[in-house]
Image: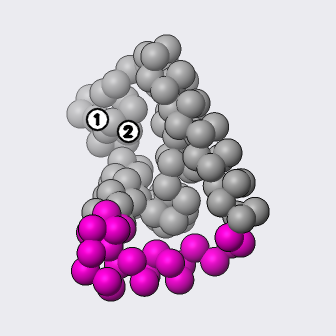
Amino acid sequence: MIFFRILLTGMFLGITAYTAIASQSYGWDLLTPFFQGLISLTWPGQFHFDFSCYLLLSGLWIMWRNQFSPQSIALGLVASVLGILFFAPYLIWLSFQNSGNIKGILLGKNQST
């Protein structure tokens, strides 16, 4: 579990630094280049579409894990937009909340008792 937490921390720090540099160079308009790439039907567009699917899946998992409570719907929507900036700290928090128990991390309230 320690390796998992270190990996997530590295991902969070890496994407935070990358985001800071990109925003200084190009500003905060990330939607225009994202959608331009998406509709271009090129490899960058394919990557954007694939990435969007992963973001949507992570948000839906958070909602499902918490039985689609109002809070989980809000968290899922946030995760679908912020990606690993939200998802890595969330998984680290879950890993401590569940004492490293993978079943608890993955299934949440959906665990059979």
Name the disc covering residue 108, or none.
2
Secondary structure under badge 1? Answer: loop
Q: Is residue 28 magenta?
A: yes
Quadrant assignment, res 59: bottom left
Return the residue found at the far right. Answer: 24
Query: What residue lies at 38% left-to-right and 20% top-to-bottom?
Result: 101
Do we see residue 92 in this rendering? Answer: no
Q: Which residues are magenta?
A: 26-48
Q: Amino acid at mark 2?
A: Gly
10 Å crowding of disc 2: few (<14), some (14-19), many (20+): some
Name the disc covering residue 111, or none.
1
Q: Position of residue 100 (x, y in %)?
A: 44, 19
Do we see residue 61 in this rendering? Answer: yes
Quadrant assignment, res 26: bottom right
Q: Position of residue 34 (x, y in %)?
A: 46, 75
Looking at this view, is 89 or 22 the one in front? Answer: 22
